[in-house]
Amino acid sequence: MNQVNDTINFESITKRCRNLDPKDLMALLRSNFRKFICWGAEGFTIDNKKNCRMFRMTVNGHLHKGFVYIFVNGADLFDVYLTTKQGVITKIQTDLYFDMLVDWIDDNIEKIPSYRF
């Protein structure tokens, strides 16, 4: 369940997740604004304003076009799922520390070898 090539199942993921603050998460994602703007991120979605457990954004990068789902797991680390627009999981990364999140997302949706930074 929730493996690469499966359709993402929110219920099973959110049962194991902690609440997250979408404002703090957006601030973290925008902390490196040059990377963030290159993702073509839009369509920011949360699952529940009071007890937010899922954050989703649409991206249009060189390497990935589709959705990026971000959850906070029980260890207070980030789990990130890249999916197609139909919800099929293409990549999963679990247990990312906050200082690794932006670079991991950039490396997997936008960064190509000819970039200098």
Image (spheres, rainbow, N blue to C red):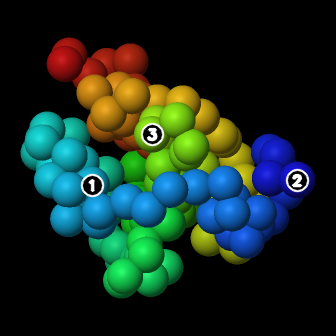
Question: Which residue corresponds to mark 2?
Answer: 1
Mark 1 vs mark 3: give the one in front. 3
- Residue 115: x %, y % from top left: 26, 22
Residue 73 in percent (x, y) is at: 55, 45
> Mark 1 falls on what kind of element?
helix
Task: Look at 65% across and 40% down and name the residue there.
Answer: 92
What residue is rendered at 58% in x and 55% in y? 17
- Asked whether 114 or 79 is in front, the reply is 79
Given the image, on which type of amino acid does mark 1 rest?
Leu
In terms of secondary structure, where does tag 2 sit?
loop
Q: Quadrant of residue 46?
A: bottom left
Residue bearing mark 3: 76
Provide the secondary structure element on which disc 3 rests.
loop
Which residue matches tag 1? 25
Q: Quadrant of the C terminus?
A: top left
Between 16 and 102, the residue placed more toward the observer is 16
